[in-house]
């Protein structure tokens, strides 16, 4: 099975405002949650295409660590994980005008071949 992981960055720390705009862009509702592994409050979305889509702080205040160390200029990140078929969220995310989204990296893992490939990375 192929698992695709994408990470998008947003240059904002306003979780509530970005959650609202992201829900509008995805045409779905957000579920506000709390998890120490995510650094506190985060938003989970239930995309109609399957998989998981989570908006969270890039800096985990509980563990005092960056989720994406190479991309500290992005206060919030969107983590997208899909298994099996792939759906491109970039057209929907490009609707976000107040809080533009930047693709930071895209990877996939093939469980049958036990192989991970980096398909795209903004910074080497």
Image (cartoon, helix red, strand yellow):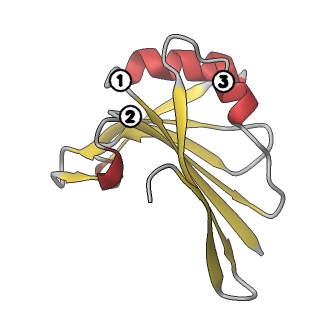
- Check disc 1 and report the residue beneath it: 12
Q: CA distance from mark 1 to mark 3?
A: 16 Å
Q: Position of residue 79 (x, y in %)?
A: 53, 47
- The residue at the point 40 percent across, 39 percent down is 56
Badge 1 element = loop
Between disc 2 and disc 3, whose residue precedes? 2
- The residue at the point 28 percent across, 46 percent down is 39
Q: CA distance from mark 2 to mark 1?
A: 6 Å
Q: Position of residue 2 (x, y in %)?
A: 75, 71
Quadrant in the picture for the C terminus: bottom left
* Disc 1 residue crowd, few under 14, some 14–19, many 20+, Cα 10 Å: some
Q: Residue furthest bottom?
A: 113
- Front-most of residues 79 and 40: 79
Quadrant in the picture for the N terminus: bottom right
- The residue at the point 40 percent across, 19 percent down is 16
- The answer to whether one can see residue 26 in this image is yes
- The answer to whether one can see residue 28 in this image is no
Instruction: Indicate left or right for 55 with 58 as reference.
Output: right
């Amino acid at each position: 099975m192929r698992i695709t992981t994408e990470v998008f960055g947003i240059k904002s720390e306003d979780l509530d405002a970005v959650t609202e705009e992201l829900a509008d862009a995805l045409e779905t509702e957000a579920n506000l949650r709390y998890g120490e592994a995510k650094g506190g409050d985060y938003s989970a979305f239930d995309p109609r295409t399957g998989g998981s889509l989570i908006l969270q702080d890039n800096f985990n205040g509980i563990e005092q660590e960056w989720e994406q160390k190479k991309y500290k200029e992005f206060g919030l990140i969107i983590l997208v994980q899909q298994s099996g078929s792939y759906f491109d969220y970039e057209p929907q995310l490009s609707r976000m005008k107040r809080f533009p989204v930047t693709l930071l990296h895209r990877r996939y893992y093939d469980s049958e071949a036990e192989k991970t490939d980096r398909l795209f990375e903004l910074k080497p």
